[in-house]
Amino acid sequence: MNGAAKAEPRRGENGPVEGVWRFPVPAVEASVPRTRHAVRDRLLAQGMAGVRYQELVDDLLLIVSELVGNAVTHAARLSPEVTTELSVREGWVRVSVEDGDPYRPKALESDTGRTGGRGLLLVKSVTLQAGGVCDVERTGEGGKVVWASLPIPREETA
């Protein structure tokens, strides 16, 4: 799976190379690890390897897994394709997952009696703990985009 850059990539100030990549996949369960691996490979290729970025990459991969998994599980009937977009820009990494289902998901509160349904709560928690933001937006075609933006760690100065 190759995501093509929309804009000419450039290196952020003391950080990874900036750009935008899209990863469209069929709305099937096998697309969850496929997308996670593609995003991981792209993050590493953009310069986010090493200890400085490890927590950020781990958080982003968890978010990708949850968002793509939710789209595949809940939107596949109305959306045969799910598109993940990765954007590295101005000190932030944004990951978004778009599908054609108009239903706007909500983060459920923790309930020990339920075995599922807490993926968005986990995404929200991880995002906020990292100092980021997340939301859900409607698309012009009637579907939705669920996204999270996390700050890129700054280089430590001595």
Image (spheres, rainbow, N blue to C red):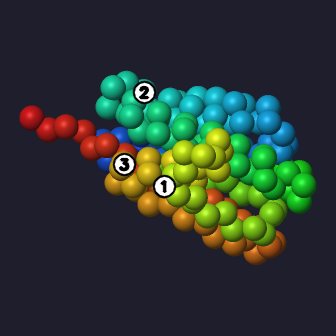
Residue 81 percent across, percent down from the top left: 84, 50
Q: Secondary structure at mark 1?
A: helix
Residue 34 percent across, percent down from the top left: 72, 31
Mark 1 sits on what residue? 124
Residue at 54% from the left image edge and 38% from the top image edge: 62
Depth check, mark 3 against mark 2: the one in front is 3
Amino acid carrying label 2: it is: Ala
Amino acid carrying label 1: it is: Lys
Quadrant position of residue 56: top left
Q: Eyeballing the image, is 43 above or below 87?
A: above
Mark 2 sits on what residue? 49
Q: Quadrant of the C terminus?
A: top left
Q: Secondary structure at mark 2?
A: loop
Say which mark, if any, is on residue 130: 3
Residue 120 percent across, percent down from the top left: 58, 53
How far separated are the C-alphas under marks 1 and 3? 10 Å
Residue at 42% from the left image edge and 27% from the top image edge: 49
Amino acid carrying label 3: it is: Ala
In the rendered structure, the answer to whether residue 19 lies left or right of residue 6 reads: left
Say which mark, if any, is on residue 27: none
In the rendered structure, the answer to whether residue 29 lies left or right of residue 10 reads: right
**Dot 2 crowding, Cα within 10 Å, few <14, some 14–19, many 20+:** some
Decide which of tag 3 and tag 2 comes sooner along the chain: 2
Quadrant position of residue 102: bottom right
Dots 3 and 2: beta carbons under 8 Å? no
Decide which of tag 1 and tag 3 comes sooner along the chain: 1
